[in-house]
Image (cartoon, grey):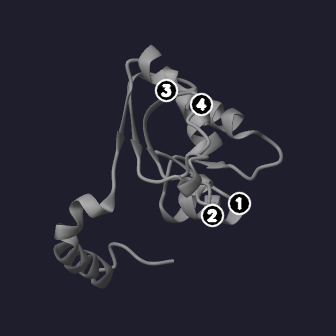
Amino acid sequence: VIGIAGGEKKCDFLLNQLKLDGAVDYKSTERTLGEQLDALAPDGVDFFYDNVGGATLDAVLLRLRPKARVVICGAVSQYSGKLNRGEVDGPREYLKLAERGASMTGFNVMQHIHRAPLALIHIGFLMLTKRISLF
């Protein structure tokens, strides 16, 4: 599992606290996001959960493996007032989905809001038993 975060401190959290296999620093001035993805996933990406959109999503779409799956949950890179004006950027590389027989689907927490009370109880239990923690 590879995570994408901005900055050395957040990448350190992904690697040392969450124990991910790799971390991409999209703020890196030494290597591009694409170069980092190529180093960590030389055979491509099988699954991507996206809440950023824009250039990050495009970089991953270029590296999809056949039959890969992409889940779109948000697009924080687009939350600068452009959404309501129809000026959203991307995805520019969406044809990679067709080329690779990959799929993209949307996910919204509101589709599951009826399960929120049970989820909060479960999260509380996990916190009490120290199986998860907040920053």
Measure the C-alpha gap from mark 2 to mark 4. 27 Å
Residue highlighted by disc 1: 7
C-alpha span from label 2 to label 3: 25 Å
Residue at the outermost bottom position: 128
Residue 10, which numbered label? 2
Please state which amino acid type lies under the numbered disc 3: Leu
**Which label lies toward us, 1 or 3?**
3
Residue 116: image location, x then y, percent: 22, 73
In front: label 2 or label 3: 3
> Residue 1 vs residue 80: left or right?
left
Question: Residue at label 4?
Answer: 92
Give x and y (percent) for residue 75: 53, 52
Task: Give the mark, 2 or 3, whose residue is nearer the N terminus.
Answer: 2
Q: Report, in whole angstroms, how far the alpha carbon at label 4 lies from the one at label 1.
A: 25 Å
Question: Residue at image x 44%, y 24%?
Answer: 97
Q: Please state the horizontal and vertical placement of residue 115, each as a whole percent of the image.
A: 17, 68
Please tell me which of labels 4 and 3 falls first in the chain.
3
Instruction: Please determine whether, in this image, residue 65 is positioned above or below residue 7.
Output: above
Vertical order, 33 against 25 (above or below): above
- Side of 71 relative to 12 (left or right): left
Q: Nearer the viewer, mark 2 or mark 4?
A: 4
Percent across and percent down for residue 54 are 61, 43
| Mark 1 residue type | Gly
- Element type at mark 1: loop
Give the residue pinned by disc 3: 64
Residue at 67 percent across and 34 percent down: it is 34
Residue toward you, 84 or 94 = 84
CA separation in Å, label 4 and label 3: 14 Å
Q: Quadrant of residue 55?
A: top right
Q: Is residue 13 left or right of residue 73?
A: right
